[in-house]
């Protein structure tokens, strides 16, 4: 397993661009199952999760070519409607094939996502919505078995906004008979990207960019092309990397409105931020980091996927701050590793109380998940001496060669390959 060796204390300076959004790609790719023919997805990131989805789609009969961020998916020869555990266990987003397979072919057998299917990241909203649309669903031997001669339009109201359930039911509804209304739908940019792609395919969707989606089912969709939006989480990570190293960075080809909540908090912490049509500049060269509380929320709130990175940043603030995660209540596995670097953090239920320290010191730390990995990299960039971040395969799930982007901005970071650490 690879690790990073980081020599901290170097300010990040310069310009960079982020890759396509992982969470958008993982919705756009299954959406091609709704049509017959070849669709092309531009700006697709080269990530482990994307390759996992390609393997799953191949198992279903989809042919693909992937080069230079251009992914072509040919759904002409789909001949399998089973998503096996061996693929789904690697990535929860694999459940996105459920809605498209069921609505187009009348049958889908999809493994329950590994680990916490009914826990803090449940899929019950997906299943309840499909049942309202007339699906017969059984849970047997670790699989979701869904059947429906034809899904019917329904009124679906989410008790809590869910990106995954919104995407899955939106894809199911576009080929259902009649009208489906999804209330309290997710507003995340990745869902907007998906909805606009479905419209290109011939779907009839009203209310895009609102919390109420009205879908009039059609008989069939055609293959189409789409541009994957830039990754707002990667952009947020690099902005905070600039702030924690007291540098000055411009991120190009990113829509600032994707990151309004993060930008406002960066300003509250003392950073100077300039916004352009498709670029963001953060200048932290002269700041004393102000303690700044955040509470995560669905878009347009502060994203839970940036919570860990913000926790690392606040560990060097001039005072006490609180980070609360209202989306995933137990998402603080990174805290114990930050403490190894010298951070002073106490977790109480779904909040971390952070007493800023004057400096972090390099140490060997271990990644536990994707965003925790990013958090530890940022802490290492700011720490004195060398930091070794182990198991960065987590990072490769969601960031395309991020070490190269950080190095282009002046970071001292080396990937060491091929050993068990």
Image: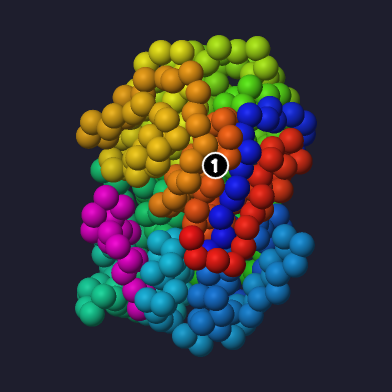
Q: Where is residue 315 in the image (x, y as percent from the top left)?
A: 44, 25
Is residue 252 something one can see in this rendering?
A: no
Residue at (49% x, 41% y) in the render: 363
Q: Where is residue 162 in the image (x, y as percent from the top left)?
A: 36, 47
Against 55, residue 236 (above or below) is above
Is residue 328 shown left or right of residue 395? left
Q: Please identify the quarter of the rendering in which residue 36 is found.
A: bottom right
Secondary structure under the numbered disc 1 in the rendered image: strand
Residue at (65% x, 60% y) in the render: 46
Against 77, residue 199 (above or below) is above
**Closest to the observer, 233 or 223:** 233
Q: Position of residue 77 (x, y in %)?
A: 59, 86
Magenta stretch, residue numbers: 108-126
Assess disc 1: are there few (<14), some (14-19) or many (≥20) residues with their C-alpha within 10 Å of its C-alpha: many
**Closest to the observer, 231 or 355:** 355
**Closest to the observer, 409 or 52:** 409
Residue at (49% x, 57% y) in the render: 391
168 part of magenta stretch: no
Residue at (45% x, 46% y) in the render: 365
Q: Where is residue 183 in the image (x, y as percent from the top left)?
A: 35, 43
Q: Which SS type dominates the magenta stretch?
A: loop
Against 260, residue 181 (above or below) is below
117 part of magenta stretch: yes
Is residue 416 something one can see in this rendering?
A: yes
Is residue 52 shown left or right of residue 341? right
Label 1 belongs to which residue? 387
């Amino acid at each position: 397993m690879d690790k990073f060796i980081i020599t901290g204390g170097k300010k990040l300076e310069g310009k960079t661009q982020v890759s396509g959004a992982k969470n958008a790609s993982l919705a756009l790719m299954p959406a091609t199952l709704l049509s017959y023919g070849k669709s092309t997805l531009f700006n697709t990131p080269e990530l482990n999760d994307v390759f996992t989805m390609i393997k799953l789609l191949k198992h279903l009969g989809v042919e693909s070519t992937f080069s230079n961020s251009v992914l072509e998916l040919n759904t002409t020869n789909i001949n399998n409607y089973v998503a096996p555990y061996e693929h789904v266990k690697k990535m929860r987003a694999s459940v996105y094939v459920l809605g498209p397979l069921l609505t187009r072919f009348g049958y889908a057998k999809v493994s329950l996502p590994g680990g916490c299917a009914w826990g803090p990241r449940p899929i019950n909203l997906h299943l309840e919505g499909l049942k309202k649309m007339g699906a017969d669903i059984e849970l047997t031997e670790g699989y979701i078995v869904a059947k429906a001669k034809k899904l019917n339009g329904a009124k679906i109201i989410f008790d809590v906004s869910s990106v995954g359930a919104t995407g899955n039911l939106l894809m199911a509804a576009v080929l259902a008979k009649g009208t489906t209304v999804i209330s309290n739908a997710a507003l995340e940019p990745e869902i907007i990207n998906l909805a606009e792609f479905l419209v290109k395919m011939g779907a009839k969707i009203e209310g895009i960019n609102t919390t109420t989606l009205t879908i009039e089912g059609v008989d069939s969709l055609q293959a189409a092309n789409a541009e994957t939006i830039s990754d707002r989480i990667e952009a947020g990570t690099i902005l905070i990397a600039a702030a924690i190293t007291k540098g000055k960075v411009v991120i190009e080809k990113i829509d600032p409105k994707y990151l309004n909540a993060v930008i406002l908090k960066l300003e509250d912490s003392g950073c100077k931020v300039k916004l352009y049509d498709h670029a963001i500049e953060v200048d932290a060269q002269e700041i004393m980091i102000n303690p700044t509380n955040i509470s995560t929320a669905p878009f347009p709130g502060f994203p839970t996927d940036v919570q860990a990175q913000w926790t690392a940043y606040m560990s060097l603030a001039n005072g006490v701050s609180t980070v609360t995660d209202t989306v995933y209540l137990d998402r603080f596995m990174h805290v114990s590793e930050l403490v190894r670097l010298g951070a002073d953090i106490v977790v109480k239920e779904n909040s971390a109380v952070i007493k800023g320290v004057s400096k972090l010191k390099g140490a060997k730390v271990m990644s536990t998940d994707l965003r925790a990995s990013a958090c530890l990299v940022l802490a290492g960039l700011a720490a004195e001496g060398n930091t070794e971040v182990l198991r960065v395969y987590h990072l490769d799930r969601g960031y395309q060669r991020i070490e190269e982007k950080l190095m282009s901005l002046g970071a001292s970071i080396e990937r060491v390959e091929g050993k068990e650490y």
